[in-house]
Image (spheres, rainbow, N blue to C red):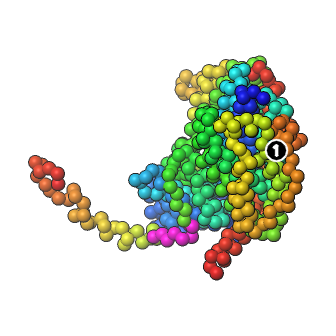
């Protein structure tokens, strides 16, 4: 799973803060990044680079964690033992990916607790896609196929991102996610060739998840003010629109192959550009969901906050026990 | 009771224990007290679902009516489930989940150790693989009982309450009925009553380290092995079996 | 604000992929005690048969060299080429040396 850069979503770049940083250090840093060198935790880095990374990596981590919920909604109802095991393993992987990413962000000097707090207070964002409900089993197929498909497209280039711990986390994430999209497509395939009720669920799931999946790549390039800076710093390696186009081009034939219809009347192959033209994305909806007005945003945040608050006594107890044990060992 | 029927029931009991507890632990996914714990509980659930697949497939093969593991998991009603009452108990808070896990996994590990030598080669093969998984479940859970029992005042009280909820279902783990006796005699199963001293020893050691009292003796609640369950199982099944029940002709 | 005293400590995780190889850093976990750290590392980093042995080390116990010191620490090795076998010329027809 992945979230693209969601700050400054209205397309208003923040006022540039005058840099008080040593120009020589800054220049050396920019040169290293431009030469595709990795930056490691204790290396000097511009404050803005650190801030952007913490924001992006923690958004990414939050997306993994919140992303456990829509699919987790179907673990108890998975239709076969194999599907149940696969789904549980997949959702668990997402938890693991959140963990790797929090760890990568922690190397920048922000604790996991601080990041979790930022999520719960609404200060930190996560991918808009997880604020949509999973209504039928076909949604589990659609999420694996489309949402993980979009995520993989976003994530593969990040294995070469300039910040070492982030890049290494992404290598692990990408390796583990290779089965996620396939299992989703397999579910869709089974349903699309199944009973009339299953076909209906499959088509309905594609109808509901198609546009939110396209939104996962973030605002159009002309409204994505941080893209240029992030690309220069190799925190981002392709623009939102480039990746979105690539996603449409690979996904449309996959839908056709299993007899499903992409819900876009304007979709057509454009020979000249060697890609599909597709309809206008409802950016109003996107920004509303970013603002926290997604259909099940409240449920998602409540679930995370409840889990955190309900677990507080457990976390405290484990520390208290460790302290007692250490005291006994010292005595 | 025919030997065949007893053996099928025996495999169903092993499979249902794993399935029902795996299903319960799956409910934690995404909601655990800490991310690391979330991953740990999911690993235990995955182990158990895998064991259930093997044992139920074996039961279906013994039965010979073309029912595979999925048919047995998703198309049987509550009266035909043979799991013990302990595993179907609700998750409650984390302490209640851990109490259930420590009591069950400690028993489960002792069972599987013996079942490695079962004369039923399919059961023996699953037990050989599963015993390593369950050894981890048991130590994971018992360590948590110690942390919570000897943690804060609140965690201690919750741990006491969790054990208190689960304790009435302990005796059933060791009860021997006709199926168990027939299978123990045939060398397929285990005389579960002989596991009790070692279980008591392990649990008492855990309680001592957790600075907790052993819950007061009480009359054991029984019936799970014969399909007389708590009210909780029906709700679990109605959720777990929903798709297979609502769309009986569908292939997933 | 979050209270750092309430957060489980961070541990660095090292995995030995198979015997014969050294342990390699793979990431970190939060855990309240050492046993929990091993289990969390196992549950997080060895789900796909990645390892046969684990080390966990409290992150706070790691002493790292300072990148600003990289020059004095590492560059002096650069001109000690005579420490490498390729520095020496051996006739082509001489083997096993």
Whether residue A129 appears in this view of the structure is no
Outermost residue on the bottom side: it is A331
Q: Chain of mark 1?
A: B
Position in image of residue A305 (x %, y %): 79, 55
Q: Is residue A270 left or right of residue A30?
A: right
Name the image quarter holding the C terminus of chain A.
bottom right
Q: Where does the N terminus of chain A fall, quadrant-wise?
A: top right
Kind of element beneath mark 1:
helix
The residue indicated by pointer 1 is: B85
The magenta region covers C58-65
- Which percent across, then down, holds residue A257? 62, 21
- Residue A21 can be seen in this image: yes
Who is closer to the viewer here, A34 or A183?
A183
Q: What residue is rendered at 84% in x and 36% in y?
A: B227
- Between C21 and A152, the residue placed more toward the observer is C21
As displayed, is residue B211 above or below residue B219? below
**Residue A151 as seen in the image, left or right of residue A171:** right
Query: How many numbered marks, from 0 up?
Result: 1
Q: Nearer the viewer, residue B183 or A25?
A: B183
Q: Residues within 10 Å of mark 1 (few under 14, many from 20)?
A: many
């Amino acid at each position: 799973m992945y979230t693209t850069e969601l700050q400054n979503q209205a397309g208003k770049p923040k006022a540039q803060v005058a840099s008080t940083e040593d120009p020589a250090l800054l220049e050396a840093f920019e040169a290293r990044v431009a030469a595709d060198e990795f930056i490691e935790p204790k290396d000097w880095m511009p404050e803005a680079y650190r801030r952007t990374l913490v924001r992006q990596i923690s958004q990414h981590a939050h997306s993994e964690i919140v992303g456990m919920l829509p699919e987790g909604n179907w673990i108890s109802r998975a239709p076969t033992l194999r599907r149940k095991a696969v789904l549980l393993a997949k959702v668990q992987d997402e938890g693991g990916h959140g963990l790797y990413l929090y760890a990568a962000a922690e190397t920048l000097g922000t604790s996991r607790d601080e990041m979790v707090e930022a999520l719960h207070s609404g200060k930190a964002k996560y991918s808009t896609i997880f604020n949509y409900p999973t209504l039928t089993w076909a949604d589990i197929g659609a999420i694996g196929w489309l949402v993980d498909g979009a995520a993989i497209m976003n994530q593969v280039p990040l294995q070469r991102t300039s910040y070492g711990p982030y890049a290494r986390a992404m290598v692990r994430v990408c390796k583990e996610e290779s089965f996620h999209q396939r299992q989703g497509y397999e579910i869709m395939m089974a349903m699309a060739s199944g009973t009339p009720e299953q076909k209906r669920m499959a088509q309905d799931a594609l109808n509901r998840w198609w546009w939110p999946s396209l939104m996962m790549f973030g605002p159009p390039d002309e409204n994505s003010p941080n893209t240029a800076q992030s690309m220069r710093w190799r925190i981002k390696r392709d623009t939102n629109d480039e990746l979105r186009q690539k996603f449409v081009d690979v996904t449309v034939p996959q839908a056709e192959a299993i007899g499903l219809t992409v819900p876009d009347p304007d979709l057509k192959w454009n020979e000249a550009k060697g890609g599909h033209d597709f309809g206008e994305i409802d950016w109003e909806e996107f920004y509303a969901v970013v603002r926290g007005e997604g259909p099940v945003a409240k449920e998602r945040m409540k679930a995370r906050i409840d889990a955190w608050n309900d677990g507080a006594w457990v976390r405290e107890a484990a520390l208290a026990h460790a302290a007692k044990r250490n005291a006994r060992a010292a005595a | 009771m025919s030997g065949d029927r007893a053996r099928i029931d025996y495999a169903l009991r092993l499979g249902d224990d794993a399935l029902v507890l795996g299903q319960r632990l799956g409910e934690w996914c995404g909601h655990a007290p800490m991310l690391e714990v979330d991953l740990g509980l999911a690993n235990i659930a995955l182990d158990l679902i895998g064991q259930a697949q093997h044992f139920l497939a074996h039961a279906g093969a013994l039965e010979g009516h073309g029912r595979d593991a999925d048919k047995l998991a998703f198309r049987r009603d509550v009266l035909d489930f043979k799991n013990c009452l302990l595993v179907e108990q609700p998750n409650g808070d984390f302490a209640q989940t851990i109490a259930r896990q420590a009591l069950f996994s400690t028993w489960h590990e002792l069972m599987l150790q013996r079942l490695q030598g079962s004369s039923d080669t399919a059961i023996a093969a699953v037990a050989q693989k599963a015993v390593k998984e369950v050894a981890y479940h048991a130590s994971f859970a018992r360590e948590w009982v110690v942390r919570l029992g000897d943690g804060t005042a609140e965690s201690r009280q919750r741990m006491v309450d969790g054990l208190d909820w689960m304790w009435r279902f302990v005796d059933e783990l060791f009860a021997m009925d006709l199926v168990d006796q027939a299978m123990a005699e045939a060398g397929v199963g285990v005389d579960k009553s002989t596991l009790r001293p070692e279980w008591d020893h392990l649990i008492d050691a855990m309680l001592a380290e957790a600075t907790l009292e052993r819950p007061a003796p009480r009359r054991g609640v029984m019936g799970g092995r014969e399909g007389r369950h708590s009210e909780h199982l029906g709700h679990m099944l109605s959720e777990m079996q929903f798709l297979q029940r609502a769309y009986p002709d569908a292939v997933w | 604000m979050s209270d750092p005293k309430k957060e489980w400590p961070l541990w660095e995780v090292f995995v030995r992929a198979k015997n014969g190889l050294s342990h390699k850093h793979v990431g970190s976990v939060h855990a309240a005690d050492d046993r929990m750290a091993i289990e969390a590392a196992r549950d997080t980093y060895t789900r796909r048969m990645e390892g046969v042995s684990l080390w966990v080390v409290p992150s706070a116990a790691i002493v790292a060299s300072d990148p600003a010191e990289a020059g004095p620490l590492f560059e002096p090795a650069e001109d000690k080429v005579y420490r490498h076998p390729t520095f020496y010329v051996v006739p082509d027809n001489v083997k096993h040396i």
